[in-house]
Image: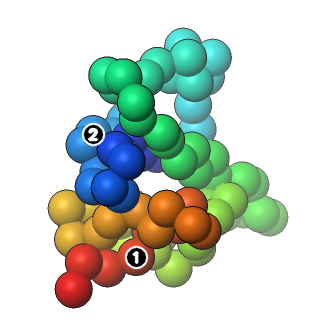
Amino acid sequence: MIIFYNKTGEIIGNIEGRVHGEEHLKMWVGEDTERIVCQWKRVGDNYEPSIQKDIFTELDKGTKKLKDFKVNLETKELEPIE
């Protein structure tokens, strides 16, 4: 998954998927945005997210929604909106 966010940490868009090719990695949304790229890695017979394993696994399963998160601008990690 690639997540695009603005200067306040608000998520403004995303590209779904576990593994992204060059085309996706070249994409940006608007100006003055940043992004988080979470590629999934093969671990034995399974795939696991490369970052924030618990959150991205829940997002992948659909048990959590991306709209319920924001990006912490210091750590560049997802955190729940309070």
Examine the image and state in which quarter residue 12 appears: top left
Visible in this render: residue 13? yes
| Depicted 6 relative to depicted 61: above or below | above
Residue depicted at 53% across the width and 47% down the height: 36
- Label 1 crowd (10 A; few <14 / some 14-19 / many >=20): some
Q: Measuring from the top left, give residue 49's x and y in whole percent.
A: 61, 61
Q: What residue type is labelled 2?
A: Gly
The answer to whether 75 appears left or right of 42 in the picture is left
Examine the image and state in which quarter residue 32 appears: top left
SS assignment at label 2: strand
**In this figure, which residue is indicated by the disc labeled 2?**
13
**In this figure, which residue is indicated by the disc labeled 1?**
79
Q: Measuring from the top left, give residue 52's x and y in whole percent.
A: 58, 71
Q: What residue type is labelled 1?
A: Glu
Q: Residue farthest to the right?
A: 44
Q: Residue farthest to the bottom?
A: 82
| Depicted 74 relative to depicted 41: above or below | below
Q: How far apart are marks 1 and 2 (CA)?
A: 16 Å
Nearer to me, 39 or 5:
5
